[in-house]
Amino acid sequence: MARRTAFKFRRAALLPLLTIGFGACAPAATRSATECSVPASTLVDVRSVDATIRTEIRYATPNNFTGRRLPGYETARALLRPEAAAALGRVQARLRAEGLSLKVWDAYRPVRATLAMVD
């Protein structure tokens, strides 16, 4: 009986915390799609970290499910946050020692490209 009461108490105490936590994750109603995009100045091309990493950015070509190049993909570059690019560079160094390589198919996707997928 005591265990059941303790469980009910924990569940009751947890409910407000979850509500507050999920409420903080809710998107702002007035935020536009362009406000959610990452500033390009904070991104790096993964090939600038390690030029041996292969890339095939299909959204920069008509060879994708939309049949056209998507807006925001003016060049076929895999843009990532510096920490992610550095991590891939470390993995590539290990793979290269074994005769293998990474291949990046997609990376940061501009909001306008995502919106064009559903239009």
Image (spheres, grey):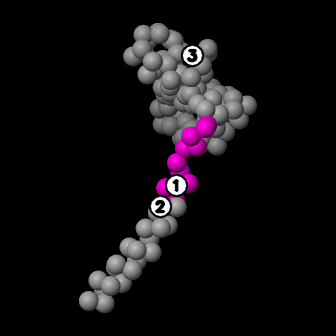
In this view, the residue in front, 39 or 76, is 39
From this view, report whether residue 84 is shown above or below residue 17. Answer: above
Is residue 85 something that shows in the picture?
A: no
The residue depicted at 69 percent of the width and 32 percent of the height is: 39
**Amino acid at the residue labelled 3:** Pro
Q: Which residue is mark 2?
A: 19
Residue that lies at the very extreme toward the right in this rendered image: 41
Marks 1 and 2 sit apart, C-alpha to C-alpha, by 6 Å
Residue that lies at the very extreme toward the bottom in this rendered image: 2
**Location of the N terminus (image quadrant):** bottom left
Marks 3 and 2 sit apart, C-alpha to C-alpha, by 37 Å
- For label 1, the crowd category at 10 Å Cα-Cα, with few meaning under 14, some 14 to 19 and many 20 or more, is few
Question: Mark 3 or mark 2: which comes first in sequence?
Answer: 2
9 part of magenta stretch? no
Is residue 29 something that shows in the picture?
A: yes
**Are the two marked residues, 1 and 2, in contact with CB atoms closer than 8 angstroms?**
yes
| Residue 38 in which image quadrant | top right
**Are the two marked residues, 3 and 1, in contact with CB atoms closer than 8 angstroms?**
no
**Amino acid at the residue labelled 2:** Thr
Q: Which residue is mark 1?
A: 23
Q: Which residues are magenta?
A: 21-31
- For label 3, the crowd category at 10 Å Cα-Cα, with few meaning under 14, some 14 to 19 and many 20 or more, is some
Question: Mark 3 or mark 1: which comes first in sequence?
Answer: 1
Percent from the top left, x then y, of residue 37?
A: 62, 32
Q: Which residue is mark 3?
A: 71
Percent from the top left, x then y, of residue 106?
A: 50, 27
